[in-house]
Image (spheres, helix red, strand yellow):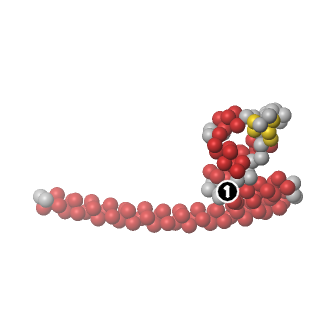
Amino acid sequence: MDRDHTYTVSELAKLFDLTPQALRFYEEKGLLSPGRMGGARFYTYRDRARLQMIQRFRRLGFSLEDIAEYLDLYRSGQDGSDQYRVGLEKIRRRLAEMETMRQEVETIISELHVLEDEALTRIGAGAATGE
């Protein structure tokens, strides 16, 4: 990938299967900071890499605030260990949330199986009595 290549709003949006409005939204939230040339926005290789991180974190369920905090460390050029420590804390918190959700889903599935069994039993009892 050519690191000197720049992208227009529509080019970068298409590359990530996003709408131009989504890129503008990320800009409004301070997650992206495109350059401007003659009034038009342009995005650099670095912006592309940031958008890739944003999309990954969004897919994993992180909030925009969490993403912004992580990217701010990245932008500030601080020691990478600080960035990874913050990231690790957020990842662990998200994992705990997902584990809780999984337990809740497993409970619901078990309850649904009980209801299913009860319904099948009643259907079978009704068929046996001719109802």
Relative height, residue 115 to residue 74 (above, below) = below
The quarter in which the C terminus is drawn is bottom left
| Residue 37 occupies quadrant | top right
Q: Is residue 112 left or right of residue 90?
A: left
- Measured as percent of width and height from the top left, residue 88 is found at 74, 62
Q: Is residue 73 left or right of residue 8?
A: right
Relative height, residue 3 to residue 123 (above, below) = above
- For the image shown, how many numbered marks are present on the structure? 1
Q: Is residue 87 left or right of residue 126?
A: right
- Measured as percent of width and height from the top left, residue 113 is found at 37, 62
| Residue 82 occupies quadrant | bottom right
Query: Disc 1 marks which residue?
Result: 64
Residue 45 in view (yes/no): no
Name the residue rendered at 73%, 65% in the picture: 89
The quarter in which the N terminus is drawn is top right
Name the residue rendered at 70%, 50% in the picture: 28
Q: Nearer the viewer, residue 101 or 125?
A: 101
Name the residue rendered at 53%, 62% in the picture: 102
**What secondary structure is found at the residue carrying circle 1?**
helix
- Measured as percent of width and height from the top left, residue 15 is found at 67, 36
Q: Residue furthest left?
A: 130
- Measured as percent of width and height from the top left, residue 13 is found at 66, 38
Q: Amino acid at mark 1?
A: Leu
Name the residue rendered at 71%, 56% in the picture: 67
Q: Nearer the viewer, residue 18 or 59?
A: 18
Q: Residues within 10 Å of mark 1 (few under 14, many from 20)?
A: some
Residue 82 in view (yes/no): yes
Relative height, residue 63 to residue 52 (above, below) = below
Q: Residue furthest front?
A: 39
